[in-house]
Structures are given as C-alpha cells and as structure tokens.
C-alpha cells in the first residue's frame, strides 16, 4: 500500500462516509401539529391566567383544539365508521366535554399533551426508519456507463441495468453491485461490511454499491438491479419493522376495544346514575369527564412499541438490522443457540495457517512458500489464492513460472527456476503409481512421488510428509503438499480463519442462555472439532445436511428450548426458518438466508449478536416498566375520582403526564449508551 493511502488529504479511502440521514422533527406532520398546538396554548395560557378578556384567549384555545385534535379526531371517526372505538376519539371527546362544562384550559391541556405523545411515537418510528434508509445515502447519484463503441456517459445510478459495464475512477463510490471485469484497486467496504481495512479487488471480485474505490480504476459489470442491491435488500427488509406489532402490542390491541367499551359504559353510568338520584348536572358531568380521561388506556397503548422501535433503531445504527418489532421481542426470549461454522464462526475464506518445510529439503519457510506461490499464482482456486496472498503478505519474491498446468481436484504444476514444482492434494501426490514414459503436463500433476524404477518403499521424506499431513488434518486444517522435481519438500496448512470475536461471542451467548451453543455444520468432524475447541463449544453436530440441521433445531425446541440459529448460507435457510429466531451474517449471506432470517448482522460482527439479545431483553424490561407505570396511574386516578373528588386539571396532568412518561421511557434505548451497556454486560 502506498503512503498516500495513509494521508487523509490525499487518499480517497480516507474520505468520510456521507452523514447519517436524520429526519427533521418538524418534517413530521404529527410534530408540526403538536408544536402548533403547544405554541397556541402557551400564548393563550398567560392571557387566561391574568384575567384578560375572553375574546383575547378563547380563539387561541379554539385553535389549540383544532391543531392538536383534528388528526386524532379524524382517525377516531374513521375507526368508529368501522365499528371500533379508538382511544384517540375518546381523548378528543374528553377534551370537548371539558370545554363544554367551562374547563376550556383543561381540555386544551389534554389536547396538547395527547398531541405531544403522538408526536413522540412518530419521532421514534421515523428515527427507526432513518437508521435503515440512511444506508441509501451511501449509493452515488450517478455512474459512468461504458458504451459498446468505447465511449462513456454519465447516467443516474438507478437507471443501470444488469449487464451494463461501468467505470469506477479512483475515489469514486461504486454505483452498483457487480463483478470486476478489469483493473486492480482497493475498496473501502467498511460502510457495508465493517471491515477496517480496504479490500483488494481485481477481475472476478464482487463489489457493492456505495463502497469507496481506492487509487486504482475498475471496470465493473452490473450484476444486480439497483432495487435488488445489497443496500436496497437490507432497506426493504428492515422498513417492515415500524409497521409490525409485537405480540404484547397485539394483545393490548385485542383488549383495548373491550376495555374502551367498558370505560364508556362506566362513564355513562357515572353520569346517568347520579342524575337519576338528583345530583346537579355540572359537577356530575365534570366527574364523568374526569373519569373518562384518567381511565383511558392511551398510556398502556404507548407502553409497548416505543421501547421495541428504539431498540431496532439502535441496533440498526450498530450494524444489526432487525426486521420487525416481533423479531426484536422474540430475540430476547431465546434460551438456546445453534451456530453454523463456515461463514459464521469462521470468515469463510481460506487462509494459510502453517508452513512446514520437510527435514532434508534444504528449504526455509520463506523459500518453500515462495516456490509454492510462484506455481500457484496463475490458479484461481481459493486455496491457491490463500498461498499466493500469504507469500505476498510476507513480501516474498515470486519467480516467473512457465509451463503452468492445472487439474481440478489435483492442484497445479509449473516450472520455477528450472525445477518442476507441484502443489496439490496429498491423496493424489503421495500415492505410489507407475507412469511409463515422459509425463505430459496433465500427467505431471498426477505423477506421484515414489514412481521410481525400482518401485521401492516410500522414502523417509514421504513418511515425514504423510505425518505432517496427518497432524494438520487432525487439527482441522486442509493440507497441501509441495513437490520439487517429484520429491516432497514441504506441506502447507490452510484453514478457514476463526473470526476474531468468535470466542468472545460464544462466551457471551453461553452467559445469556446458561448453556454452551450447539455447533451445527455440514463440515467434517475434525474441522468442526477444531473450531469448537477454539471457541469453547462442547456440543458438536457435524456433517449435517440442511434437513438434518432442521431436525437438530426441532429436537432442541421439542425439549422446550427457544432456539436462536445463526447462519449465512443457503443450507442454513431451513434451520433459520425453523428456529424461534434466525440471524444471518450479512456479508457473505445468501439471498435465501437473508430473506429467511429475522435479523441480519450487516458488518459480520459476531459479538453484536449477544449485544442485541441483551438490548431486546432491556426493551422487554422497559415494556414491563411502562405497563406498571400506566396501570398504576390509571388505578390511582380512577379510584380517586370514584371514591373522592379528583380535580380535572390534576386528572389531565396525571394521566396524560403518564402517557408522556412512558413514551420518554421507551425512547431511552435510542441512546448509544444503551448499546454500550448491553455490550459490556450481556444478559444483565
């Protein structure tokens, strides 16, 4: 990497990401009407309290009723037309009833507080959507499309079609998801995947819309329509969150209708019975209106959604996109965890982990790796890329290779510095066999060691190679044998590197649910055991087909467990669907897994999963707090009004104040400190 990449002023990779989109509060109709009602109320209040003529403050109060009450009143009338009784309509009727008996100020106060409560909920919902839609700000508005005649044109990024070829210049944001056709560069993908370092890109590599190109130039073939890009898919999944209802909310809405009918009946009885017994009209009506106000369940209704929506918004800002309030609530209910291996606990990318020159080969680790990488450089096999990348990482010289040949499942052969170098699988290169006559290029790959004229027993070098292979495979690594002129000179160990936060995440999940997660993988037993040993997992289910993963999950749920499944591939999708809650790793996750899961870890930060579980539990705790607050206020105020005489202003302030209180309490999880507490103290 050149030094310019480390200088913020010169490096395109050092450019900051676009600011996170944030809805202006006044852009929300609910907030504008609530603010207007508040301003009008504050203008009228001192005039009324100071004894000014009614014509100075009465129009202001009337305007307060209109600005703060018309929208909930209209929604309530529409609900009444559908034969349902809405809390919004009850609040407006209560305010008008207060005005009818001369308590204009009290009714206006009720309207203002109720409008403010609705605005708070609208703000929470909008901020949730902002955390998701803000991702779209990363996509550039235009892209440079290459024409068949070699020309180019600037077009809106949204107009790009699959198959188009675009040119991405240094420092530009990539305009579409696609595959690199030509060019080499480093791309900053931190805004999508959370990778702290730029990722090298060359022909054949995948790139994503919204990521920042480095110092090179790339030609990219568009592979996905703009509406189906990684950013767009994530947005489409999570935008459903604000429109869904958690089970608790659904339960509240079921009882809301019955409760409202009972409350209206009680209000009418509290008004009619005393009148029949000879009570005066005005105090009786005032008492009935006060009861209807304090007994209305608006605070109970507001108790559930704000905490869950706030938790969704907070998680979204930190790279975990939860699809719905239902999913957020369910995440906190889990008491068992099942983890996939490849692409979940591990990065899903093979990396060179060990270089073993054989005794007597006369090669150092660097010399062995240099020769192997020189032979592998022209290969596109993932294991070959791991070897070449490791050599380049060490800064080793790669000699020119001639007579390159490759055979699927076998490896490669090439002439390096005048020597025939073979790199391939032990099962092929260490099997005795005869191949009479000079080998062809394909035969050179298949020509084993020990194909000697006397057909003697394998040499000590071959035995040492076999032992090294056995040890590496026993540790869960993939062994690659290197031969020079038909003689084994070393063995390379390649492994799917464990995620840096895998052990931390497993420990945190164990603390949360009380038992170690289960490893469910289609990989072999040895690789699974190696990964489990390094992460602290004790329950291993290896070699599973997709349907067997589902059976493992259902077995846990049959035992009464609520299982969280974390995976990334198509083979994980059935288990994600069968589980109580499914979480997909977003970077390498298949489309099917992303669509099936309840949540997506966009940055592939495994340690974020226990944090979200803890955040979900905190949200459920706030729901319980809010329900307790709302229920207590209703019981105390309604009881006071039935037993004694509750002043209407106190009833309005107490009940509607509780509505604001539970709304603000639910918004506590919007703060970044809530995420940090959940991360530092999982499960608490």
Image (tube, helix red, strand yellow):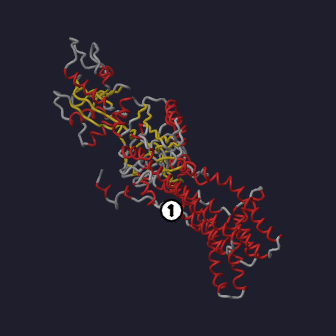
In x, y percent, where is residue 350?
35, 37
- The part of the image, by quadrant, that contains residue 477 is top left
| 164 up-or-down from 370: above or below | below
Residue nearest the observer in this picture, 523 or 554: 554
Q: In this view, does 406 lie above or below 663?
A: above
In front: 226, or 104?
Answer: 104
Q: Residues within 10 Å of mark 1 (few under 14, many from 20)?
A: some
Asked whether residue 165 appears in the rendered view, the answer is: yes
Camera-side residue: 449 or 343?
A: 343
Residue 605 at x, y percent in the picture: 41, 48
Answer with left or right where residue 207 lies relative to residue 291.
left
Tag 1 residue: 668
Using the image, determine if residue 120 lies above or below residue 246.
Answer: below
Looking at the rendered structure, the secondary structure element under dot 1 is helix
| Residue 373 image offset from top left, x and y in percent | 28, 35
**Above or below: residue 483 compared with residue 294:** above
Q: Quadrant of residue 282?
A: bottom right
Measured from the top left, where is residue 163 in percent x and y?
52, 42
Q: Residue furthest top?
A: 454
From the viewer's perspective, tell me whether residue 508 is left or right of residue 118: left
């Amino acid at each position: 990497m050149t030094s310019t990449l480390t200088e913020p002023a010169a490096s395109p990779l050092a450019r900051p990401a676009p600011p996170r989109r944030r809805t202006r509060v006044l852009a929300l109709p609910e907030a504008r009407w609530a603010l207007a009602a508040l301003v009008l109320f504050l203008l009228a209040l001192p005039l009324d309290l100071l004894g000014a003529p009614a014509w100075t403050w009465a129009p202001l109060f009337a305007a307060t009723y209109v600005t703060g009450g018309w929208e909930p009143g209209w929604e309530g009338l529409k609900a009444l037309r559908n034969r349902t009784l809405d809390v919004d309509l009850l609040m407006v009727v209560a305010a008008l009833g207060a005005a009818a008996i001369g308590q204009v100020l009290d009714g206006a106060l009720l309207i203002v507080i109720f409008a403010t409560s609705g605005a708070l909920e609208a703000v929470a919902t909008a901020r949730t959507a902002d955390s998701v839609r803000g991702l779209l700000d990363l996509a550039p508005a235009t892209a440079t499309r290459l024409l068949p005649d070699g020309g180019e044109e600037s077009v809106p990024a949204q107009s790009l079609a699959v198959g188009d070829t675009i040119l991405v210049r240094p420092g530009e944001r990539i305009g579409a998801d696609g595959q690199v056709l030509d060019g080499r560069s480093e791309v900053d993908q931190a805004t999508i995947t959370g990778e702290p370092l730029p990722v090298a890109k060359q022909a054949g590599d995948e790139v994503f819309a919204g990521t920042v190109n480095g110092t090179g130039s790339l030609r990219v073939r568009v592979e996905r329509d703009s509406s189906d890009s990684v950013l767009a898919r994530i947005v489409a999944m999570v935008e459903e969150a604000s429109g869904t209802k958690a089970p608790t909310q659904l339960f509240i809405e079921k009882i809301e209708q019955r409760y409202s009918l009972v409350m209206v009946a009680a209000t009418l009885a509290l008004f009619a019975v005393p009148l029949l017994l000879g009570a005066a009209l005005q105090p009786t009506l005032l008492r009935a209106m006060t009861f209807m106000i304090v007994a209305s369940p608006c605070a109970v209704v507001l108790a559930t959604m704000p905490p869950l929506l706030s938790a969704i918004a907070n998680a979204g800002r930190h790279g975990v996109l939860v699809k719905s309030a239902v999913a957020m609530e369910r995440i906190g209910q889990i008491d068992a965890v099942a983890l996939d291996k490849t692409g979940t606990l591990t990065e899903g990318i093979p990396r060179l982990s060990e270089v073993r020159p054989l005794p007597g080969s006369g090669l150092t680790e660097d010399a062995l790796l240099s020769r192997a990488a020189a032979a592998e450089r022209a290969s596109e096999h993932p294991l070959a890329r791991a070897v070449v990348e490791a050599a380049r990482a060490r800064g080793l010289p790669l000699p020119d290779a001639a007579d390159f040949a490759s055979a699927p499942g076998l490896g490669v052969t090439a002439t390096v510095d005048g020597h025939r170098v073979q790199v391939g699988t032990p099962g092929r290169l260490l099997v005795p066999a005869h191949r009479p006559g000079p080998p062809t290029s394909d035969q050179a790959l298949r020509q084993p060691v020990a194909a000697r004229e006397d057909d003697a027993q394998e040499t000590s070098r071959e035995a040492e190679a076999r032992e090294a292979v056995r040890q590496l495979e026993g540790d869960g690594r993939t062994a690659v044998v290197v031969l020079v002129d038909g003689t084994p000179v070393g063995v390379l160990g390649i492994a799917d590197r464990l995620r840096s936060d895998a052990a931390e995440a497993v420990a945190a999940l164990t603390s949360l649910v009380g038992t170690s997660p289960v490893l469910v993988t289609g990989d072999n037993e040895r690789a699974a055991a190696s990964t489990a040993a390094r992460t602290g997992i004790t329950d291993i289910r290896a070699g599973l087909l997709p349907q067997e993963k589902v059976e493992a999950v259902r077995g846990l749920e049959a035992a009464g467990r609520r299982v969280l499944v974390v995976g990334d591939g198509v083979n994980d999708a059935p288990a994600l669907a069968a589980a109580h809650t499914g979480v997909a790793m977003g970077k390498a996750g298949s489309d099917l897994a992303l669509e099936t899961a309840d949540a997506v870890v966009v940055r592939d930060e495994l340690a974020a999963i226990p944090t979200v579980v803890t955040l979900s539990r905190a949200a459920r705790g706030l729901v319980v707090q809010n329900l307790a607050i709302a229920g207590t206020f209703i019981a105390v105020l309604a009881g006071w009004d039935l037993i004694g005489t509750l002043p209407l202003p106190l009833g309005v302030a107490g009940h509607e104040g509780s509505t604001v209180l539970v709304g603000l309490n639910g918004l506590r999880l919007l703060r970044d400190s809530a995420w940090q507490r959940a991360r530092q103290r999982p499960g608490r």
